[in-house]
Image (cartoon, rainbow, N blue to C red):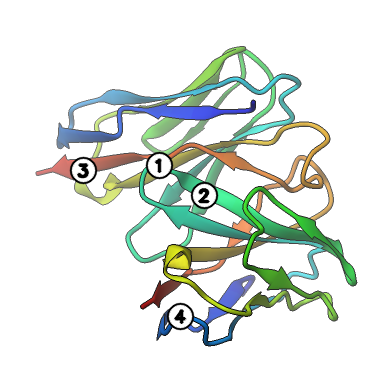
Amino acid sequence: EAQVTQNPRYLITVTGKKLTVTCSQNMNHEYMSWYRQDPGLGLRQIYYSMNVEVTDKGDVPEGYKVSRKEKRNFPLILESPSPNQTSLYFCASSLPDRNTEAFFGQGTRLTVV
Amino acid sequence: EDQVTQSPEALRLQEGESSSLNCSYTVSGLRGLFWYRQDPGKGPEFLFTLYSAGEEKEKERLKATLTKKESFLHITAPKPEDSATYLCAVRPPFSGGYNKLIFGAGTRLAVHP
């Protein structure tokens, strides 16, 4: 089954404690992105990757890092989480064709206290 | 600035009561408008892509239409299982890689028996 898998689904952490949210896709997609979803603001792009070792900032990259060492994996790293990073996070992947839709993971609900 | 606005924020319908959701955008040089459905606790699920004014697409009780400045998602004779948040997203030109999507905040639809 084609899917994007995120882990963990739920995470509660304390301010400043480094964490990583993993994302893996099995569709051999070149493009992968991270979004955060906040009430009233919709989904906003954090970082994206056009292929292995090629990443760039989205609209809200502050406080986040990513890496793309393998085509299927695109982890999101919070080096020093803060309460304003409490949010619902989604990983997405798609083919490079501009006309194709993005496939989303199930989401990771992060709470930073 | 590229922007996507959805209205209403929330909509309550009786089963069988048809209605429309609106998505207006200010992106110039649109390279696709996407409709997604999002159920609580899940990632967005792709519904439709529209590319040019006048285009229409249908799926079961849903029909999406596109003009130069907005899109409508028409729901005909809705059922309780159509209850979800409906997200509209546009793909702008030349930003965030080819897979960037700019999302609206969504419309929460509740269909009651």
Is the residue A56 above or below the residue B61 in the image? below
Q: Say if A79 sits above or below B42 in the image.
A: below
Amino acid tagged 2: Leu
The span from disc 4 to disc 1 (Cα, nearest Å) is 33 Å
Which residue corresponds to mark 4?
Answer: A15
Which residue is drawn at the image coordinates 62% and 19% (left, top)? B55
In the displayed structure, would residue A109 be above or below residue B23?
below
Decide: is A58 above or below B103: below
Query: Which residue sits at x=74%, y=30%?
Result: B31
Q: Secondary structure at mark 1?
A: strand
Q: CA distance from mark 1 to mark 2?
A: 12 Å
> Residue tagged by mark 2?
A43
- The one of A101 and A52 positioned closer to us in this rendering: A52
**Can you tell which of label 1 and label 2 is closer to the viewer?**
2
Tell which subunit mark 4 falls on. A
**Discs 3 and 2 share one subunit:** no
For disc 3, the neighbor class at 10 Å (few under 14, some 14 to 19, many from 20) is: many
The answer for how far apart the CA atoms under marks 3 and 1 are is 11 Å
Question: Which residue: 89% across, 71% down?
Answer: A52
Real-space Cα distance between discs 3 and 2? 21 Å
The secondary structure type at the circle numbered 3 is: strand
Q: Nearer the viewer, mark 4 or mark 1?
A: 4
Residue linked to disc 3:
B110
Q: How many marks on residues? A: 4
Q: Which residue is mark 1?
A: B86
